[in-house]
Amino acid sequence: MNPSPWSFRPRLPRRLMMFALLTASLGACAPEEEAQALEPLARVESELPAGGWRVLMPSGGAPIRGITRRADGLLIGGSSWGHGIDVWTSANGGASWALHGSVANNPSVEFGDVTMLAIPGTHTVFCAFREYANGQFRVTITRSDNDGDGWVYDSTVAGPTTRFVGAPFLFRRGNGDLQVYYDSELLAAQGGFPGHQWIAMQGRQGLTGAWTAYGTVTVSRDKRAGALSREGMPTVVQLSGDRIMAVVEGVEGFPTGGARANVINAVQSWDGGRTWDDSLRRTVYSSRIDPGSGRRYNAYVPYAIRVGGGPVGVAFCTDEDKAGPPDLSSAPVDQRSCHVGFVTTTTNFETWSAPSPVWTGTSRNYTPGLFERAPNDVIAVIDGLGTNRVLLR
């Protein structure tokens, strides 16, 4: 997300990344009022609880977040190492991954927030990502018409702009329209709220053409008077017909104990994303309050999918079981302590379960991603900021 002083978290370019890829059978940061010294992190290393998600692949590379399935059945996804975007494929349902070329390489550009979407019945795969160059941000789309073997420029959705735009998510509406959801400080500033960040959506009719079919839609923001609204990292799922849900990272609109913690929010649309129903805005998960500091622990970088045609499941990072006070929501990713949790909807997509653990084996994790390989058969990819692992339930 935004690496500016009003950042969610700095996203550090890196070649080596650590992932946890898990499977199971299943039925945005704030500016701090004053910079604070980072406290030493307690190392929390433990085995997964009985019945939890367990290791399937002990080491190796993998994509981050947006995994999709191409026409020949292989899984495909991407990851950025700073000045380039790698393509990864798996022929065994995610148990191991192999490098499969590159989407982009440019020493003058910083790439991030990579996601992919394959179009069923075709050999077309779209790849969306953030670019940063010459002090400006862009949300860019590339396209492959041969299952990810080669890539061409498709379009620029947003930018160039000095205000942050990034973390795109590709979603295909039920009528076939392609939509892009993304973080936008630009949209918030244009709406009269500089320093805020909202979720924007733009779409095209079908798979080609200008991103103007919907205008620029404000998907998710905190509209309470006086609240700071910084939302990011959207994922979108279809519920039924044109009813869809966006799940996003946010921050507390008002500080708890003098600081704003990350929380996870959701909002729904009844018309395929054209408008969004604030009466169905929900807090998916907010962590407990630390009694010592009075601050709330964080819940951040969520990823949502619809599981088995039933509930919506959301994986996310949280520091609520670390020793000591919560991390600052503005702390660098590699200085935050977290495990990965999971919640699901329980009633009509409007209420949420208590959390269960996904990964507690290490305390340095980031950006979980979910993919349903078959009905009720879900893998979770976790960037662990080091080497790689794959887990199985």
Image (tube, rainbow, N blue to C red):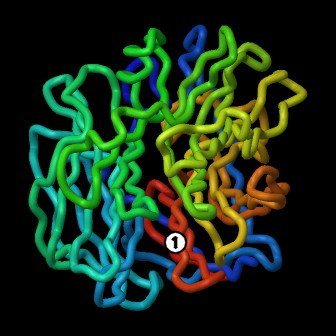
Vertical relation: 328 (above or below) 319: above
Observer-nearest residue: 71 or 56? 71
Observer-nearest residue: 62 or 269? 269
Secondary structure of the residue carrying numbered label 1: strand
Side of 303 relative to 215 (left or right): right
Q: Percent position (x, y) of residue 183?
A: 42, 35
Side of 334 relative to 216 (left or right): right
- Which residue is tagged 1? 371
Q: Dividing the image into 4 quarters, which one contains the N terminus?
A: top left
Q: Percent position (x, y) of residue 313?
A: 67, 63
Image quadrant in which you'd find residue 133? top left
Q: Residue at x 39, y 43 (%)?
A: 167
Image quadrant in which you'd find residue 287? top right
Q: Percent position (x, y) of residue 160?
A: 19, 28
Vertical relation: 54 (above or below) 370: below
Disc 1: CA contacts within 10 A as few (<14), some (14-19) or many (>=20)? many
Q: Percent position (x, y) of residue 365?
A: 55, 53
Q: Residue at x 22, y 51 (%)?
A: 141
Q: Residue at x 12, y 65 (%)?
A: 151
Vertical relation: 46 (above or below) 365: below
Q: Dividing the image into 4 quarters, which one contains the C terminus?
A: bottom right
The amino acid pointed to by label 1 is Phe
Q: Residue at x 62, y 64 (%)?
A: 240
Say if residue 28 shows up in the picture: no
Side of 141 relative to 390 (left or right): left
Say if residue 264 shows up in the picture: yes
Observer-nearest residue: 148 or 246? 246
